[in-house]
Image (cartoon, rainbow, N blue to C red):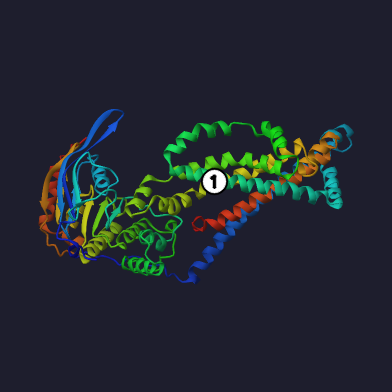
Amino acid sequence: MTAEIEAPVSPTTKSPVETAPLFAKRRWDRLRAAIAILATQLVILVAFLSFWQHATSGNTTFAFMFGSPSAIAGFLGQMARDGSLFRDTYVTGLETLLGFFVGNLFGTLIGLSLWYSRFVSRVVEPFIIALGSIPIIALAPIIIIWFGTGLVSKVAMSTLSVVIVALVTSYKGAVGVDPDQINLMRTLGASKFQIFRKLVVPASLTDIFAGLKLTVGFALIGAIVGEFMSSSEGLGHAIFKAGSLYIIPKVFAALVVTIALALLLTFIVGKIERLLMPWRRQI
Amino acid sequence: MIAEARTSEPPLVVEHVAKSYDLDGQIVPVIADLSLTLKAGEIISIVGPSGCGKTTLLNTLCGLLAPDSGYIRWHGREVFGQPQNVGYMLQKDLLLPWRTALGNTMLGLEIRGTAAAEAEHRSRAMLEQLGLHGFADHYPSTLSGGMRQRVALARTLVNEPDVLLLDEPFASLDFQSKLLIENDTVGLVRQGKRSLLLITHDIEEAISLADRVIVLSKRPTRIKSVYDIELGSGRTDLMEVRENPDFSHYVRSIWADLDVVRQ
């Protein structure tokens, strides 16, 4: 008996005619599942809004206390007409984006570079935990004294809400790299910087992006809390002002815009993630 | 490119190496006293009972761990840190998921600063030699276990190491993939006149590939016995080797040496 050693496999050469209907069916199955999910979500939303509308119509106390979808829509229209909708969204969006960017930039840079020195990371660990446990709202009055009542103080609030989270998630990603992988790099002759750049940074991307998605919300909260404390424009200002005047549907209207802004920013981060990590798409 | 051309010294000499771990103040000796010489162009398999410190030995050899005593000489010289021209491969393929098969293969050349065009050319040629033509631009997540391990082998061989240290590199593969990749590995090692130190728990693999099989004792590890495998050094067909009557004789002797106690 002689051994039969087959040639190593080569890419499949099945004709497209054979496989095309199969793939078309799978695509259709996936599309159907996506449509079913979206439809269910819409049904839940519509049911909730109708119940809200129904419960508050004909009852002035309820309408005053809880607003109503139609009143909220009315305020949204009014805010769009007088331009405050766009102006406030722009202001809060800018504060959030700047805080998000600066906080994540510094947080990630520090978090990743802590990988470089076990000594430094162990020295600073308790300080980072201490800083991370400070409620940012408690800092707001000081921030306003330091940075004034304009854009900078909101960006500072937003940055502070983001930076520790970004630092912790990126550091976690960096130290979580498989030690065998580091050994392999070393046997290939890699310097510490090469290991950092070619292994640690790309390997941490998954955690960094998890942090980015998490911090979109934190950046927005920071900006809005900053506006609550002292401001003349922005969604937080609109919410605060409408709240003090007991115009509850207007509070909700500004909240709807805030939610839309958060969703938009999260969506953009997701897009960038898919763009930067193409290897995760091909499965 | 060819090992003998560099120096007349054997590529790897290990002299009385000992290694222990300190576990919370308790000293656990792993390697008691170990000496061996890997000659140029030679293939040595090391087998031993589970947990006998094979991996510790390998990590010590390639400078990832420092021995407590003894010497390790590469081409007659003691090396601090990682020895040059040594390829290292584990059971885990350790491919970087964000790099394609080609990108993973190029890693070592990139680290050494080889020009990108040359690195790509050599890597493509190596992938082709290992039967991965057409898969160069695939990400590891789309490749089978056997193919991933082939990419890992390409990443090791493309640097033209004169010594390869392999730690159970084929242990997680199915029998067919394993036999194929073993054949290719031996072929490329012999063809390039490289030396190979293979750590394995698979006795048949150890015998069919090697010129010499070293059997280790239980911890703390010493060399228990050494077998010169005389099945013809020109063997290229690892299935045929297994048919040789002497093959089963070696298997029985080594199995007896391993002293495996039935649970």
Could you say which quadrant of the image residue B6 lies in? bottom left
Could you say which quadrant of the image residue B148 lies in? bottom left
On the rendered structure, is A228 left or right of B159?
right
Quadrant location of the C terminus of chain B in the rendered image: top left
Residues A58 and B113: in front is B113
Q: Position of residue A150 (x, y in %)?
A: 75, 43
On the rendered structure, is A89 left or right of B71?
right
Residue A176 position (above or below residue B96) = above
Residues B198 and A23: in front is B198
Q: Is residue A40 visible?
A: no
Numbered marks: total: 1
Q: Position of residue A85 (x, y in %)?
A: 80, 49
Q: Position of residue B129 (x, y in %)?
A: 31, 68
> Dot 1 lies on which element?
helix
Quadrant location of the N terminus of chain B in the rendered image: bottom left
Q: What residue is drawn where x is 48% and y is 69%?
A: A18
On the rendered structure, is B245 left or right of A42?
left
On the rendered structure, is B164 left or right of B155?
left
Residues B200 and B33: in front is B33
Q: Amino acid at mark 1?
A: Thr
Circle 1 Cα neighbour tier, 10 Å, few/some/many (<14 / 14–19 / ≥20): many
Q: What residue is drawn where x is 87% and y is 38%?
A: A57
Q: Residue furthest top?
A: B25
Q: Is residue A212 visible?
A: yes
Residues B153 and A239: in front is A239
Q: Which residue is mark 1?
A: A108
Q: Position of residue A224 (x, y in %)?
A: 72, 40
Residue B43 position (above or below residue B223) = below
Residue A253 position (above or below residue A280) = above
Subunit of mark 1?
A
